[in-house]
Image (cartoon, grey):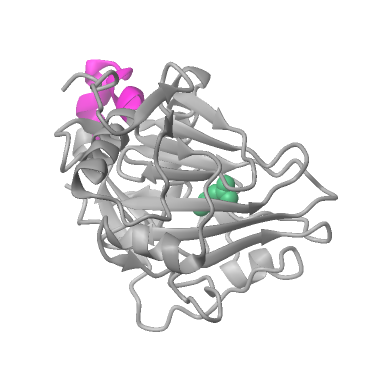
Amino acid sequence: MKQLRNAAHRHIETSPIAGSLGAEISGVDLSADLPEEVLAELRAALLAHQVIFFRGQSLTPERQLAFARRWGEIHLHPFMVGMAEYPEVLEIVKRPTDARNFGGSWHTDQMFAPAPAMGTILYAKEVPSAGGDTMFTNQYLAYEALSPGMQRLCERLRTVCYGDGAKKYGGKTRREFYADKTTMQVKDPGEVQTTSVHPLVRTHPETGRKALYIGGHVQHFEDMEDAESRPLIDFLMAHSTRPEFICRFRWETGSLAFWDNRCTQHFAINDYPSETRIMHRVTVRGDTPF
Ligand code: SIN
C-alpha cells in the first residue's frame, strides 16, 4: 500500500515534519470528547504518518486516559511503577540529579510482551529549555530498503525479546540498570510474561504493509545463539535507524505525540544534564504480531 500522506481531512490539518514519517496535527482539542469522524481522521493520519504530534494541549491524566481508551484497552507496564492515583499513567521523569533517562535507546514499546503495545500516547508536562527531543524511525521504509535477498532471510527469522537483562540494559536487570541513575521506580513484574518471540518482519494489521520489527529488546534469533545473532541484529539496528528513515520532534510543554509501535522505533535523547523533563505516558494494548 502506498503512503496515505495527503489524505483530505475535514476536521483536522496535517503537516508532515520530515520526508520519512511524522506529522503535526492541528485543529483538535484532545481534552474534548471527540466525535467518531474526528477519531477516524486521526486514525487515518496515524496510519499514514506512523507518528502524529499535537501542540498546545491541556490534559489531565483522566483526559489523557479517556483519549487513549478511544483506541483500545490500556497496556500496563509490567516493570515501571505508574502514578499513585493513575497506575495506567507512567510518569517519565528525569531530574538534574538523574544520569539516565527512560527510553534512551532505539526500541519499540513493550516488544518483550506477547501482544506488545499498539500505540503510545506521550504528553509533555515539563520540558528542558533545549534538548530532550524524541526521534522516531519508519520501519516500513527500513524493510523496503533491504535487498530482496535480505528481505527473504529476515522473513524467515523470529526474534527472542527480553524485558529484563537484555543487551539494551548492558545485561543487567532493569532494577540494577536504573538504580541510583533515575528517580523512576522499577517493580517486580510478578507472573506477567516478559520474554516473547516475534516475527522479524511483521505485517501491519491495519495497513497490510510489511515492517521490520526490531528494537533494543531483541536479544537473539530463535534457535540461534547470541553470538550468531548479534552481527545481523547490529546491522539491522544500524540500517533501521538511518537518517533518511528518521524524524525528530522538539517538545514544548503541552505537546503530545501518538506513535504506532507496530511500524516505528523511537529514542528519547538524553542531552539536558542539569534540567528537568516530565512526561505522562499511556500505552494502548496491541495484538500478537504476525
Ligand atoms: C519512551 O520510550 O516511551 C520515552 C520517550 C520519551 O520520553 O521521549
Which residue occupies 48% across, 34% down? 136
**Above or below — where is 127 with respect to 33?**
above
- Residue 77 lies left or right of residue 80; in this view the side is left
Report the predominant secondary structure element of the magenta stretch: helix
**Above or below — where is 141 with respect to 234?**
above
Occupied quadrant, residue 21 = top left
Which residue occupies 50% across, 46% down? 256
Residue 229 screen position, x and y as percent? 40, 42
Residue 289 screen position, x and y as percent? 21, 50
- Residue 69 lies left or right of residue 100; in this view the side is left
**Above or below — where is 1 with respect to 282?**
above
Asked if residue 217 shows in the view, the reply is: no
- Residue with the most extreme bottom position: 190
Residue 116 screen position, x and y as percent? 31, 57
Which residue occupies 15% across, 23% down? 1
What segment carries the magenta color? 140-154
Give whichever of 45, 178 is nearer the camera.
Answer: 45
Asked if residue 36 shows in the view, the reply is: yes
